[in-house]
Image (cartoon, grey):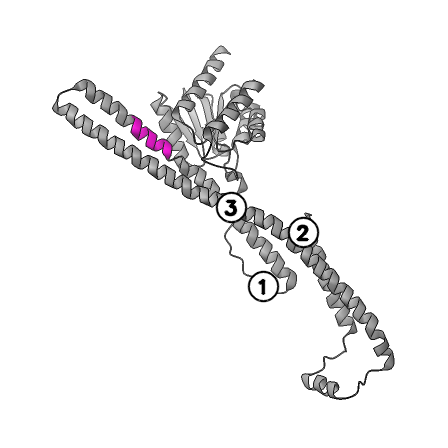
């Protein structure tokens, strides 16, 4: 399973990638914003973890763009963001985000959300 | 156009009106200092009709000045309310940056202390040839190192808080420049030239606090809507 990790903070990308490695996912590709993520996205990407606030293209814009692509309609999208007001969470959901993690997060939460989304994807 | 901009516009318009009125009623050439002093010491040379018009002129000018003062007062109130709120919020954010940095540093130092103890345990396990204890110590050491990495998330959040503070400072600068230009439109004011951060790159509400409650809210919303 290839993970696309999108965040404009290189620190956060390292933390997420490291957390993924720790829970057994070594295949990752990184992007600094939504636009770069769209360029790097291909059918081999099985999971997208994205921040919200980024230059050029935000996480919700990325989610909408992916949902418009044939190869991005079904990919699980997990948003990891500092934004946590009700309206933001609903907006993310409407954009096509499948689950939501609030920063700062624990590796345990990350694992739980990934497991849950993978189970949902497997169940179809 | 926002209410603040309308007030500034009104104020500027009123000031220009007063300027215009004064110009209209001023003598074609400005009297010199000496002429003024001489006029003060001698009987008025103005015609009776000009003198008769003076009270109404003064009345009009007074009304315009009162209008200007009211506009300025309103402008000041609008600016003050918005500015004070933003500055208070920014001040809170900056305090939070300090506390988040301190909490993260303390967490990391604590984790390093524990990691040091695990290394000591590893040494003693080696000496005793206790593989089980060595493995347990290694696992604990890995946990600590991983925990340190998690603590570094404060960097992303404090970056957003500082970006918010920077955007407020930029906003304040713009307002002060607008106000200064209002009083002297012809003057050239120097701009700090520091670009405001892209508002898409930060969340003004970013915080390291109450992560559990905020996560619970997100979970509830996704659970209910699913």
Q: Residues within 10 Å of mark 1 (few under 14, many from 20)?
A: few
Q: Is residue A69 visible?
A: no
**Depth check, front residue: A124 or B119:** B119
Chain letter, disc 3 residue: B
Query: In the image, what residue occupies the spot 24% across and 24% down?
Result: B138
Q: Secondary structure at mark 2?
A: helix
Name the residue beneath numbered marker 3: B90
Give the spatial CA distance, label 3 vs label 2.
23 Å
Instruction: Confirm whether circles 3 and 1 share one chain.
Output: yes
Dots 3, 2 in contact, CB < 8 A: no
Q: Residues within 10 Å of mark 2 (few under 14, many from 20)?
A: some
- Percent x, y for residue B118? 23, 28
Query: In the image, what residue occupies the spot 70% across and 61% down?
Result: B69
Q: Earlier in the sequence, mark 3 or mark 1?
A: 3
Q: Earlier in the sequence, mark 3 or mark 2?
A: 2
- Residue B44 lies in the magenta stretch: no
Dots 3, 1 in contact, CB < 8 A: no
Residue range corresponding to the magenta coloring: B143-151
- Percent x, y for residue A25? 37, 21
Give the spatial CA distance, label 3 vs label 1.
29 Å
Q: Earlier in the sequence, mark 1 or mark 2?
A: 2
Q: Nearer the viewer, mark 3 or mark 1?
A: 3
- Residue B144 lies in the magenta stretch: yes
Most common secondary structure along the magenta stretch:
helix
Name the residue beneath numbered marker 1: B188
Query: In the image, what residue occupies the spot 35% across and 28% down?
Result: A18
Where is B65 relative to B207, above or below?
below
Chain letter, disc 2 residue: B
What mark, if any, has residue B5 been given in the picture? 2
């Amino acid at each position: 399973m290839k993970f696309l990790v999108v965040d404009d903070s290189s620190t956060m990308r390292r933390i997420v990638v490291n957390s993924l490695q720790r829970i057994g996912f070594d295949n990752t590709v990184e992007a600094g914003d939504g636009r770069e993520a769209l360029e790097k996205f291909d059918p081999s990407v099985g999971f997208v973890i994205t921040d919200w606030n980024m230059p050029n293209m935000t996480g919700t814009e990325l989610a909408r763009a992916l949902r418009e692509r044939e190869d991005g309609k079904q990919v699980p999208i997990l948003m990891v963001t500092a934004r946590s007001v009700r309206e933001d969470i609903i907006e993310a959901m409407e954009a096509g985000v499948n689950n939501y993690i609030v920063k700062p997060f624990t590796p345990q939460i990350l694992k739980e959300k990934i497991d849950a989304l993978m189970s949902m994807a497997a169940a179809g | 156009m926002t209410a603040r901009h309308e007030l500034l516009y009104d104020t500027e318009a009123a000031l220009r009106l007063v300027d215009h009125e004064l110009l209209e009623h001023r003598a074609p050439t400005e009297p010199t200092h000496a002429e003024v002093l001489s006029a003060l010491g001698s009987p008025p040379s103005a015609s009776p009709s000009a003198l008769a018009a003076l009270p109404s002129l003064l009345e009009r000018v007074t009304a315009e000045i009162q209008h200007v003062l009211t506009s300025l007062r309103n402008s000041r109130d609008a600016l003050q309310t918005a500015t004070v709120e933003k500055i208070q919020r920014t001040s809170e954010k900056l305090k939070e940056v300090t506390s988040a940095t301190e909490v993260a540093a303390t967490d990391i130092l604590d984790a390093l202390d524990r990691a040091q103890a695990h290394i000591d345990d590893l040494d003693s396990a080696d000496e005793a040839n206790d593989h089980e204890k060595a493995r347990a110590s290694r696992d604990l050491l890995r946990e600590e190192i991983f925990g340190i990495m998690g603590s570094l998330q404060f960097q992303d959040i404090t970056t957003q808080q500082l970006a918010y503070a920077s955007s407020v400072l930029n906003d304040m600068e713009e307002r002060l420049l607008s106000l200064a230009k209002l009083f002297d439109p012809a003057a050239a004011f120097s701009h700090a030239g520091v670009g405001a951060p892209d508002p898409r790159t930060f969340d003004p509400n970013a915080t390291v606090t109450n992560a559990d409650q905020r996560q619970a809210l997100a979970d509830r919303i996704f659970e209910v809507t699913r």
